[in-house]
């Protein structure tokens, strides 16, 4: 069964904690993690409002009944010892993700959906003992929007599966590109994500239109939509865009790309950035992506301020102007830096935090 980011993280960390000798129980609506007990907290009803609220209420009761020495929350739940903020902080997303009139802004403030999500977010933050974020970006947002004391928050960057995502030889890369129908000498820019609007696919299309017929764009992680396909043709880049849909072999797709672009409006930490880098593929993203903190350590010029087509076109153009040897040097550099973000390192940091705060 395919799992999203939060579900995949839960399965990964739960299994690895068990391998390290910890007794692990998952509280969730359902779970497919082998060998780990499930305490069911149902997500009932139709629509995100009622599902979120019912899970919030049921998980609260499950936590109260639990005899666990440490509760690690991965969503908006009440009463966790540690709460990991990995989905967009809703208070920040309301500012960053919506362009609205005064009346639309007022409507968001009083709408049932936004009001409940904000209430759950406040309760989750207020009742946990310690917060974990996957970037300094989100830590700063917690301080700004919820007046959280910085000492109350620890930044623990995500891990990446380095056995699956790793660089290959030039010969192997040529073979992968041929298998995907990429012509020799063709420059490929890859985009991957399901939430196409938030991740900035429209910005990428407009940037590519500014560059002219210089690059091939591959879109993975989502099926083509009529709206974005119409946008491609309106911009005159319909023949330059290939839709790959959901892929189980993303490691091959990263290897085939010359450049990975994620001009997102907001991501606490987009895991695809580390995956691409681990494969040796340079990344362009925005400072509104917590993963830009990792990209900047390798190449500051690949981080743009915001999802602006002119800025993105300039950054892609600068990459295209680099020589072949400079491209290869950058591929080696990003892969080497990403290799430090192993899951073992992530688990070590979690265990240190859990031991420090759970015994307090």
Image (cartoon, helix red, strand yellow):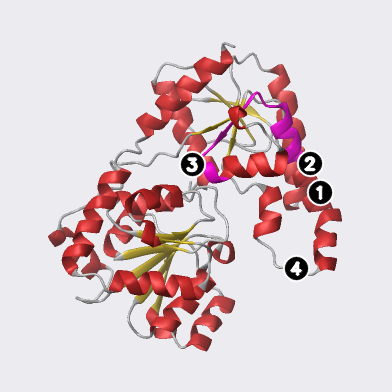
**Which is closer to the viewer, label 4 or label 2?**
4
Q: CA distance from mark 4 to mark 3?
A: 34 Å
Magenta-highlighted residues: 119-137
Per the rendering, the mark at residue 119 is: 2
Asked if 266 appears above or below 321 in the picture, the reply is above
Asked if 228 appears above or below 42 in the picture, the reply is below
Residue 240, quarter of the rendered image: bottom left
Between discs 4 and 2, the one toward the N terminus: 4
Between discs 4 and 1, the one toward the N terminus: 4
Position of residue 75 measured from the top left corner of the image (x, y, whole percent): 63, 38
Q: Which residue is mark 3?
A: 8
Q: Are discs 1 and 2 less than 8 Å apart at CB?
A: yes
Q: CA distance from mark 4 to mark 1?
A: 17 Å
Residue furthest top in the image = 359
Q: Is residue 242 left or right of residue 186?
A: right
Q: CA distance from mark 1 to mark 2?
A: 6 Å
Q: Which residue is mark 1?
A: 115
Q: Which residue is mark 4?
A: 100
Specify whether residue 44 is in view: no
Few, some or many residues within 10 Å of mark 4 (<14, 14–19, 20+): few
């Amino acid at each position: 069964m395919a799992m999203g980011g939060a579900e995949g993280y839960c399965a990964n960390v739960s299994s690895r904690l068990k391998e390290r000798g910890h007794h692990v129980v998952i509280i969730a609506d359902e779970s497919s993690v082998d060998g780990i007990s499930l305490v069911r907290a149902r997500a009932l009803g139709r629509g995100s409002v009622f599902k979120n609220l019912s899970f919030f209420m049921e998980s609260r009761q499950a936590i109260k009944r639990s005899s666990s020495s440490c509760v690690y929350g991965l969503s908006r739940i009440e009463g966790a010892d540690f709460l990991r903020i990995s989905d967009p902080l809703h208070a920040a997303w309301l500012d960053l993700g919506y362009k609205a009139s005064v009346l639309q802004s007022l409507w968001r403030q009083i709408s049932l959906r936004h009001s409940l999500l904000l209430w759950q977010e406040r309760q989750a933050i207020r009742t946990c003992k310690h917060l974990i974020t996957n970037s300094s970006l989100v830590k700063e947002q917690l301080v700004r929007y919820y007046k959280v004391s910085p000492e109350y928050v620890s930044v623990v960057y995500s891990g990446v599966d380095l056995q699956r995502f790793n660089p290959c030889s030039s010969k192997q890369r040529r073979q992968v590109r041929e298998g995907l129908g990429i012509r020799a000498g063709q420059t490929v820019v890859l985009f991957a994500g399901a939430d196409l609007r938030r991740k900035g696919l429209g910005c990428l299309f407009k940037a590519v239109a500014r560059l002219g017929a210089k690059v091939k764009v591959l879109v993975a992680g989502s099926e083509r939509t009529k709206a974005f396909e119409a946008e491609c043709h309106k911009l005159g880049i319909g023949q330059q865009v290939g839709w790959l849909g959901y892929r189980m072999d993303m490691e091959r797709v990263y290897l085939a790309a010359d450049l990975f672009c994620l001009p997102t409006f907001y991501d606490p930490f987009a895991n695809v950035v580390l995956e691409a880098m681990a494969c040796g593929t340079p990344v362009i993203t925005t400072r509104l992506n917590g993963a830009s903190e990792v990209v900047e350590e390798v190449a500051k010029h690949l981080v743009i301020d915001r999802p602006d087509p002119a800025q993105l076109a300039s950054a892609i153009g600068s990459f295209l102007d680099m020589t072949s040897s400079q491209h290869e040097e950058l591929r080696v550099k990003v892969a080497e830096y990403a290799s430090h973000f192993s899951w073992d390192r992530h688990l070590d940091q979690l265990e240190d935090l859990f031991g420090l705060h759970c015994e307090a």
